[in-house]
Amino acid sequence: MYMNIRYNGPGLSDYYSHNRFKYSHFYPSERLALELVAPGPTTTILDIGCACGGLGLALNEQFGCWQYTGLEIHAHAAELGGHLVERFGGRVIAGDVLEGATLLEPARTFDLVVSLSALDWNEQIRENIRAAWKYVVEGGVLLMTMRLHPHICLEKIIDSCQSTTPSLGGGSELAPYIIMSVPKAVHFAKSLGATQVDVFGYWGSPSATARTSVKECIFAAAVLRKGLGGNQHTKFVVHSPPSLVEQVRSIQTKNDR
Ligand SMILES: C[S@@+](CC[C@H](N)C(=O)[O-])C[C@H]1O[C@@H](n2cnc3c(N)ncnc32)[C@H](O)[C@@H]1O
């Protein structure tokens, strides 16, 4: 049985009810990925780790989306988020992505499953991504962010972590600060059976509140497309940064030999 941490630290809901709720608040790489997907009023959206539903408000403002379901493990953030998104017809459900099958309508799938800084903000990163992928309808997409490094992989909270309340100067509740190596991320994306993976990334320093040995990593927003009819060959289209374009090309060339 896979377990995630059930966050309840104070400060998280306060931070996310006042930040990241307008489209302009989101990072350029996140906006590029969203604009590639270009959701519209008919797009059904599941936002995993939605905090207080800020992305729902931003997608409603920018693209007119309203068929929005947020899923959030922090009960108080979920409660606040539910009130904030109900003004345009959205909803937020409290719970873990791994329990989604019991929380959402049975066998429910979505055109766009989005998760910004959330699938990798808990213990079971791989199971969390696999669970998120199941909610993508055939022909739909999973848009997720993650941190990458050319070769270092830090997937355990003991090796790399961050306070869940950085806005308060860092409380004692910790979340993993996962950094995945590029070869492992490429392998994992292929194992999901994505038909195409578009990536927008940039190099940056880890958050000042993170306790990690990595000095620089790539902050990446990835759009994984689910083809019709099961597993297929995965095409990678890396837009930035140039070092990632080169590394993924060389991994692909080696694999094709
Ligand atoms: C770093 S915050 C990002 C919030 C929001 N997605 C954003 O980008 O503004 C990560 C959020 O994911 C939630 N979360 C972490 N693990 C989760 C899980 N397994 N299921 C649902 N939510 C989760 C956390 O409680 C937190 O609110």
Image: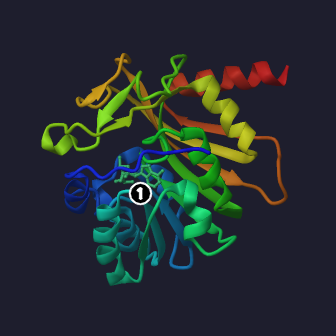
Q: Nearer the viewer, residue 237 or 159?
A: 159
Residue at left 14%, top 43%?
168
| Residue neighbourhood size for the residue with mark 1, other residues' Cα within 10 Å, grouped as few (<14), some (14–19), many (≥20) | many
Residue at left 70%, top 46%?
196
Q: Secondary structure at mark 1?
A: loop
Residue at left 21%, top 52%?
10
Q: Nearer the viewer, residue 225 or 38?
A: 225
Question: Residue at label 1?
Answer: 73
**Left or right of residue 80: residue 30:** right
Q: Nearer the viewer, residue 239 or 54?
A: 54
Q: Quadrant of the C terminus?
A: top right
Across and down, in percent, residue 108 comes to: 65, 71
Relative to residue 237, is residue 105 depicted above or below? below
Identified by mark 1, the residue type is Ile
Q: Is the C-beta of the residue carrying label 1 under 8 Å from the nearest atom of ligand 1?
A: yes
**Left or right of residue 31: residue 15:** left
Across and down, in percent, residue 106 comes to: 67, 73
Relative to residue 256, is residue 32 depicted above or below? below
Across and down, in percent, residue 157 comes to: 42, 29
Relative to residue 107, is residue 119 depicted above or below? above
